[in-house]
Image (spheres, rainbow, N blue to C red):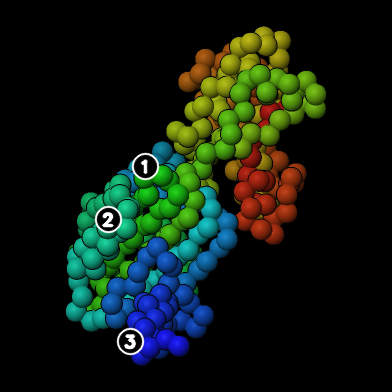
Amino acid sequence: MMNRNAIWMLLIVLLALAPVVQACDQAGAEDHPLLPRYEGSCLARAKVVSFDEFRLPLGPVVRNEEGKWVPAEARLLEGAFTRLIYTTPEGRSPLEVMRNYQNGLSSAGFEEIFSCVERDCGQLRHSMIDAIFPSDQRENADMYLTNFSQQTRFAAFGKPDGSAHIALHVGYYKEKSILTAVVMESEVMEMRLIDAAEMNRSLAESGRIALQNVYFEFASARLTPESDPALSEMAKLLEENPVLEVYVVGHTDNVGSIDANLALSRDRAAAVVAALEQRFGSEKGRAIPAGVGSYAPVASNVTEAGRAENRRVELVVR
């Protein structure tokens, strides 16, 4: 038989391990174990996806060459995605909330890899909240209009081993701080690099090869720096096989209109060809761009994992 003291100790431990639940929480919403709740907060919104991709902002939001507002630098992640929206008790400033999380996450082994305050995060209407929580995904847009607050703060954190990353945005709305958090349980997207020799073998055997290591900014044809290793191997393939001519074919998932996906796939293929010729020294005309949008999937578009496979670039022998 356990004595009374032992029973009380066990009860205390169980209560400490139990998730925090407030009467004001969204029905069914739960905290994430890597992100303790700020005391007295309400969990207003929660979204959990078993597999998704997320671009972790590592620089202020700026206008890119295509006129779109995107983080100046971002890290592409994939894995388990969780987005949580908390409202804090009245009178708690964004600074107080952010300092609590900075201290707590540091103690939990996270490293802060980027942070910004107010307008240093971006231009008024194009700030970090849009980068981590696009406006077209919000049910109640007013609640998240914290870009206009002069107290807005953003910080990105990561585990040294790359196993988890957290993005936090805190703004002020109607006397309360609003915390928007994204938790990614994943390593930085690092798929096995297909080298020039393997590309050559696949082209000889099947006439095509799919490349998943060519990355673009979200909904854009702008290549990211993570694409350079794959582009370098493609250029090496063409250099080592002087008679080889290929189509560079862009593919998308089925999210969005057919026309938009076709245009995006063509633009992405053209961007790859331009990079091969202008940056990696490939002979002009050896690679011809083409795009087929979502017409040739290799996996189901019902799941995010399938959609991720369908967003690809292929080389096809001409």
What whole-number distance in Å separates the C-alpha atoms at marks 2 and 3? 34 Å
What is the quadrant of residue 205 in the picture?
A: top right
Tally of numbered tags? 3
Q: Nearer the viewer, mark 2 or mark 1?
A: 2
At x 46%, y 81%, the residue is 26
Q: Which residue type carries mark 3?
A: Asn
Location of residue 275 with respect to 187 vertically, above or below? above
Indicate which disc, 2 or 3, sits on the residue closer to the N terminus. Answer: 3
**Which residue in the protein does label 1 denote?**
73
Q: Is 58 on the left-hand or right-hand side of 255?
A: left
Residue 106 - label: 2
Residue type marked 1:
Glu
Q: Residues within 10 Å of mark 3 (few under 14, many from 20)?
A: few
To which residue does mark 3 refer? 5
Measured as percent of width and height from the top left, residue 256 is found at 62, 56
Q: Secondary structure at mark 2?
A: helix
Q: Nearer the viewer, residue 199 or 73?
A: 199
